[in-house]
Image (tube, rainbow, N blue to C red):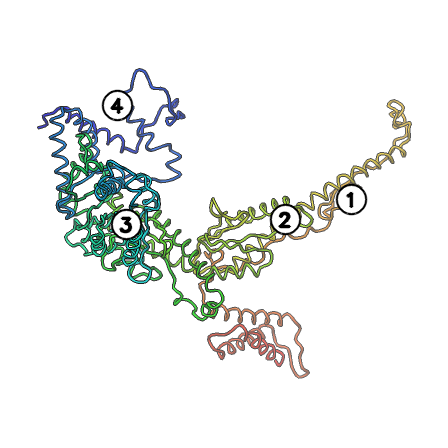
Amino acid sequence: KMVDPTLAEMGKNLNEAMKMLEDNQRKVEEENEKYARKDIPGPLQGSGQDMVSILQLVQNLMHGEEEEETSQAYRLQNVGEQGHMALLGHSLAAYISVLDRERLRKLTTRILSDTTLWLCRLFRYENGSAYYHEDDREGLLKICRLVIHTRYEDYTVEGFNVLYTKQPVIYISSAARTGLGQALCNQLGLPLSCMCRVPCNTMFGSQHQMDVALLDRLIKDDVESGKLPLLLVANAGTPGAGHTDKLGRLKELCEQYNMWLHVEGVNLATLALGYVSSSVLAATKCDSMTLTLGSWLGLPAVPAVTLYRHEDPSLSLAAGLTSSQPVEKLRALPLWLSLQYLGHDGIVERIKHASQLSQRLLENLKNLDFIKTSVEDELSSPVVVFKFFQDYSNRDQASHAAQASTLQHPIISNERHIYDTFNQWLGEQLAQLVPASGVDVVELEDEGTCVRFSPLMTSAVLGTEIQDVDQLVDCLKMKIPVLTSTLQLREEFEQDVRRTVGLLYIEDLSWPGLGVVRYNYHGDGKNDDKQEKELAKINAELLKKLKELESDLTFSLGPEFGGQKNCVYIGVVTEDLDVSELVETIAATGREIEENSRLLENMTEVVRKGIQEAQLQLQKANEERLLEEGVLRQIPVVGSVLNWFSPFQASPKGRTFNLTAGSLESTESTYVSKAQGTGTTPPPTPTSSLAKQRLPGQKPFKRSLRSSDALSETSSVSHCDDLEKTEQRRPPTLSPGQEQGPLETQKTEEQKEMAQATKTDTEDVQSDKSPHDCTKVEEQESQR
């Protein structure tokens, strides 16, 4: 039974608040409040608001407007019961802080000691202390201050003067987080020369592990130059590829030079499992480590923890690792509640589940072609990094060997750029199709752009399951043939475009698709601005017409930023694409648009000149009419009387403009025949005659499903049939002793002879043999 009514009310209010915030079905607001902008700051209301109204405002700010929801889907963190416990910890911390000092001291000491003991036992770190912090870099910062206080005894009194006489050096891996070294120097007030970046292996071992031999040489050089090696930051799971440094050898090196070893990384989570790899297990002997339990266990708003070993509590207090203020110790309260709710088995089960997900994906990737993995251990790796890659062994090695001597470096650089582009597209597609997988795109120094799957960082938050990994593999299987086909057809598309008059190939290595093409328009006698506008107009109309075709291809204007102007970007394609038909269609459509545009310009100019000429002719006709009628007929009263006595018969004269011929014609023939003349026949509208006959249901730019042999045989026979029909229409030339039989008999004999000629030939009739066969038929007809 709950004794403290405040705690009971707090838990009740938290449950109600979470239910309201997690409810995505918002109530329909009144019509007068429909267009109210809730995100604009306003004055504080004097009467105050109740909790329901305030929570409703928070919910509206969280979920945003309806149009924002439809434009981009978002996924909130999966906050379960353990998440509610972590959120309750923040409320309890505010409530506990109002207790009297003695009760607060006892409670905070118990919370801090319990949480530290549980974490040290869970992650096999004996006799350790803990520092809880919000920023995951803050723990390393306090450790650096602790080491400075330890190695420089007079630092508390003399400050930077001690550092000036013997400059400290902090060693960090080149595979560490971006900006970590600069952030440490800025916070510690040290120059950037105090930070030494250690390169990774280049010859032996993983290319993401720190080069231990080179590190030893760097430390020796610094010692000889009068510097003080202070601290080494190693990785148990690099931020990019998830590889672990050789922690055992690094610890020996640190003991040799009296340096502090700090370890961080996602692979530290596996220390809680029953089986731990030896490389990660060596992290238990380090001087300090940073744990990010929030992402590993799916706990919102819980602090990161830095475990460390040090014997002098006064130096820890001076470095800020411990605090005399009881309120500072309440940072561990959300974690204290969440760890009790999950229990030891629950924590281990979550980490084990994430490891099983990565193992499941790694096993499936081994069976896929054109997928190259970059993992530290092929049997078990918490982080799986893979990329699409088509080796030269799968291509034409002869052509590659011929080009290697002259074009080796450009080919390698362009190939690297193209593969980076394709893998960027692949990662984005997988993340969009399977959002629960949590895959993302990562840039690695040696491998380039890769797709990363790190379930220890995402599975607890997104609720990733085994079926999500299977769905990810299925999507990957569907995308690999598309990527291989696009990569193989890019060169053919480029060659066809360069051979086609009127098309300009635009090389854009950052476009993940078949390629980029522009219809090249050259205006005669036009300035650059007008020609540029005409070029943009033609290519925009070309893109519109290509989109109207019912094909599986995607045509677009390219990326929003950094793309070429006035171009048509073609997306990924399948292997059944007919590249020649696609290029011919683009060229024919562009020519048609250009001709129609020129025709419209010419018609506009002709119409303008025709109107001016018609006005002059009509004015001249009016003057002639006045001379024929005389001056008396123009006087109002006299003209009417004269017209009554002697009517003047004059045919109405007008002008008609023939758009086809571009000339003016008289309207006399129109009034005589009571019908308007049609003039000359207009020329046919230019259209693309390259659209080939397709099978029922076949989309544009697709190759026929029939084999080439079957197509050649059909074309040969049909060509012979056409020649037979032509011979039948001609009057046959008969010899004196020959008689002409009935037409039906002749057709029957020709069909029999054609069937016999077809049977005697081989099954695969080539197209180049068809004229010879048709000559035989003509000779037989002439003899007959």
The amino acid beneath tag 4 is: Met
Label 3: how many residues lie within 10 Å, few (<14), some (14-19) or many (20+)? many
Q: What secondary structure is marked by label 4?
A: helix
Q: Are marks 2 and 4 in contact (CB under 8 Å)?
A: no
Give the mark nearer the N terminus: 2 vs 4: 4
Residue found 34% across the figure and 57% down from its top:
477
* Residue on which the image places disc 3: 454
Marks 1 and 2, the one that precedes in the sequence: 2
Q: Earlier in the sequence, mark 4 or mark 3?
A: 4
Q: CA distance from mark 1 to mark 2?
A: 25 Å
Which label was assigned to residue 31?
none
Q: Are marks 1 and 3 in contact (CB under 8 Å)?
A: no
Q: Between label 4 and label 1, give the one nearer the viewer.
A: 4
Q: Which residue is mark 2?
A: 596
Could one spot residue 516 in this view of the protein? Answer: yes
Where does residue 537 sit, x and y in percent of width and height?
58, 45
CB within 8 Å, label 4 to label 3: no
Depth order, front residue of 411/49 = 411
Residue 665's tag is: 1
**Label 1 secondary element:** strand
Tell me the element at label 2: helix
Callout 2 environment at 10 Å: few (<14), some (14 to 19), or many (20+)? some
On the rendered image, what quadrant is the N terminus found in? top left
Amino acid marked by disc 2? Asn
| Amino acid type of the residue that numbered disc 1 sits on in the rendered structure | Glu
Gap between marks 4 and 3 measured at Cα: 39 Å
Q: Provide residue 784's location: percent of width, then percent of height.
A: 61, 80
Pointer 2 or 3: first along the chain: 3
All told, the count of numbered labels is 4
Residue 51's disc number: 4
The x, y position of residue 139, in whole percent, is 24, 41
